[in-house]
Amino acid sequence: MIGTDKNGVNCFFVKKDLALKYDLKPQDSDSIFKVHKTRTEGTYTKVPQSQEEQFERIKNFDFVEV
């Protein structure tokens, strides 16, 4: 993982051989994480929610590995 989009929604990954070729360094998720601005501010839903409130809503969902 080398980064995320400006909203912190999409992560970008590069194959190891390309990362080595272009001297791209893997990034720690904690160092590149961004709060999802539109959810936190309630831009579309008109219901602002903290990260903790968002997690409460989804914490019991099944995890599906893709």
Image (cartoon, rainbow, N blue to C red):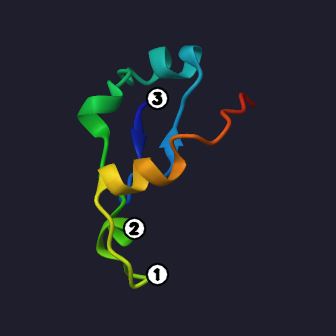
Residue 44: percent from the left, percent from the top? 46, 82
Local secondary structure at mark 1: loop
* Residue ID for mark 3: 1
**Callout 1 touching callout 2 (CB < 8 Å):** yes
Q: Which label is found at residue 39?
A: 2
Residue sitting at x 46%, y 29% = 1
Residue nearer the viewer, 41 or 56: 56
Residue 15: percent from the left, percent from the top? 59, 22
* Residue ID for mark 1: 45
Q: How many marks?
A: 3
Q: Amino acid at mark 2?
A: Arg
Residue 45: percent from the left, percent from the top? 46, 81
Picture quadrant where residue 42 is located: bottom left
Q: Earlier in the sequence, mark 1 or mark 2?
A: 2
Residue nearer the viewer, 23 or 12: 12
Local secondary structure at mark 3: loop
Picture quadrant where residue 66 is located: top right
Q: Amino acid at mark 1?
A: Thr
Local secondary structure at mark 2: helix
Residue nearer the viewer, 3 or 47: 47
Residue 26: percent from the left, percent from the top? 38, 21
Q: Is residue 5 left or right of residue 33?
A: right
Residue sitting at x 44%, y 24% = 22
Q: Is residue 48 above or below residue 64?
A: below
Residue sitting at x 49%, y 54% = 57
Of circles 2 and 3, the one toward us is: 2
Q: Is residue 54 above or below residue 11?
A: below
Q: CA distance from mark 1 to mark 3?
A: 30 Å
